[in-house]
Amino acid sequence: MAPSQNEMTPERLNLARLAHHRRRGLAAMAVAAVLAAFVVGGAVGWVARGAEEATTSSDLTRFTTDALEAYRLYAVEVRHPVEVPGDQRPHLVEWLSKRLGSPLRAPELEKMG
């Protein structure tokens, strides 16, 4: 038997200690990763919260404004443009030009069938 076989393994090379130390390091890294994900997710959620409210409010305001403009354009008329038959095209173009405040030109679709 060689003299080195009877020697004790140095503590720095003890496999049980190295495995325990490695597991503890992995657990600490896992906890750090979970905490980092929680903080980043919370920060992103906090920032995005205001963005969605602003978009929804802006969309609702634009929709309401468009609806009011359409109502003001069509509701005051006794004879609505949807009730004007196709053979009265000049009347419809004249009415829309007057209501919108600028001259309009309707396309000629008779040639296309």
Image (cartoon, helix red, strand yellow):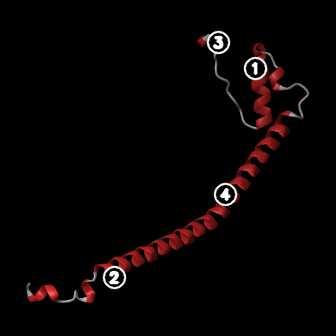
Q: CA distance from mark 2 to mark 3?
A: 91 Å
Say which residue label 4 marks: 52
Q: Earlier in the sequence, mark 4 or mark 3?
A: 4
- Give the mark nearer the N terminus: 1 vs 2: 2
Label 4 or label 3, whichever lies nearer to me, is 4
Left or right: residue 92 versus residue 35 is right
Judging by the rendered image, the residue that carries numbered circle 2 is: 17
Q: Secondary structure at mark 1?
A: helix
Report the quarter where the N terminus lies.
bottom left
Question: Which residue is under mark 1?
Answer: 90
Task: Determine contact: label 4, label 1, CB under 8 Å.
Answer: no
- What element does badge 4 sit on? helix
Q: Which one is earlier in the sequence, the residue at label 2 or at label 3?
A: 2
Q: Secondary structure at mark 3?
A: helix
The span from disc 1 to disc 2 (Cα, nearest Å) is 95 Å
How far apart in space, not on screen, are marks 1 and 3 (Cα)? 14 Å
Q: Which residue is mark 3?
A: 110
Neighbourhood count class around disc 1 (C-alpha, 10 Å): few under 14, some 14–19, many 20 upward? few
Q: Quadrant of residue 95?
A: top right
- Nearer the observer: mark 4 or 1; the answer is 4
Q: Which badge, 4 or 1, is on the more N-terminal residue? A: 4
Q: Position of residue 87 (x, y in %)?
A: 76, 13
